[in-house]
């Protein structure tokens, strides 16, 4: 089973992601960007779903740090900030794609499959 790291500091948003992912993928949670970087360093993940606004280290900084070591790891920004400028910043940081919260389960699964398959 493919494994995803969900970097999400908000409990209710993580519960929603649990509901979306549990049938198809194994996953772990990081509660901030630094934790996400550390977990990617010590674990094997097929993809990261990265919240952008998080404490300690935001998702853009975390994405840059992860991409320095693992440039081919797909990272999808998952954020409530849905402006074109936010999308551009995420892509510039190294994100492969961008999803706005609240994300539909169908769109989320389709986006994940685009990068890592079933």
Image (spheres, rainbow, N blue to C red):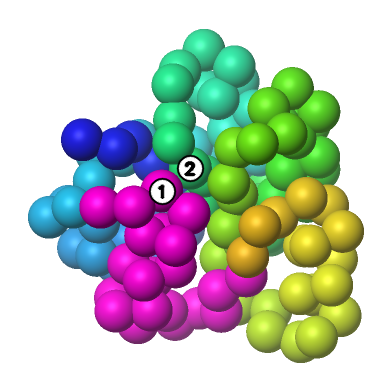
Residue drawn where x is 44% and y is 21% of the image: 44
Q: Are marks 2 and 1 in contact (CB under 8 Å)?
A: yes
Q: Quadrant of the N terminus?
A: top left
Please tell me whether residue 115 belongs to the stretch shown in magenta.
yes
Provide residue 117's location: percent of width, then percent of height.
34, 52
Provide residue 63's location: percent of width, then percent of height.
73, 43
For the residues carrying marks 2 and 1, which lies nearer the camera in this image?
Answer: 1
Seen in the picture, residue 110 relative to 55 is either above or below; the reply is below
Which region is colored magenta?
98-118
Residue 47 badge: 2
Res. 25 visible in picture: yes
Residue 99 shown left or right of residue 70 in the figure = left
Q: Marks 2 and 1, how far apart in space?
A: 7 Å
Residue 116 badge: 1
Q: Which quadrant of the figure has residue 105? A: bottom left
Residue 56 badge: none
Residue lying furthest left in this view? 23
Of residue 61 and residue 94, the one placed in the foreground of this image is: 94
Is label 1 in a helix, a strand or a loop?
Answer: helix
User: Considering only order in the chain, which callout, 1 or 2, is on the residue closer to the N terminus?
Assistant: 2
Seen in the picture, residue 79 relative to 76 is either above or below; the reply is below
Residue 49 shown left or right of residue 52 in the figure = left
């Amino acid at each position: 089973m493919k494994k995803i790291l969900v970097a999400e500091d908000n409990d209710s948003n993580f519960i929603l992601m649990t509901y979306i992912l549990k049938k198809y993928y194994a996953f772990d949670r990081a509660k901030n960007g630094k934790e996400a970087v550390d977990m990617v360093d010590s674990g094997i993940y097929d993809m990261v779903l990265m919240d952008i606004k998080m404490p300690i280290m935001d998702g853009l900084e975390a994405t840059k740090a992860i991409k320095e070591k693992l440039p081919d790891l797909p990272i999808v920004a998952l954020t409530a900030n849905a402006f074109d400028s936010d999308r551009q910043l995420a892509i510039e940081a190294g994100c492969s794609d961008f999803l706005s919260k609240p994300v539909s389960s169908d769109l989320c699964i389709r986006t994940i499959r685009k990068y890592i398959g079933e």
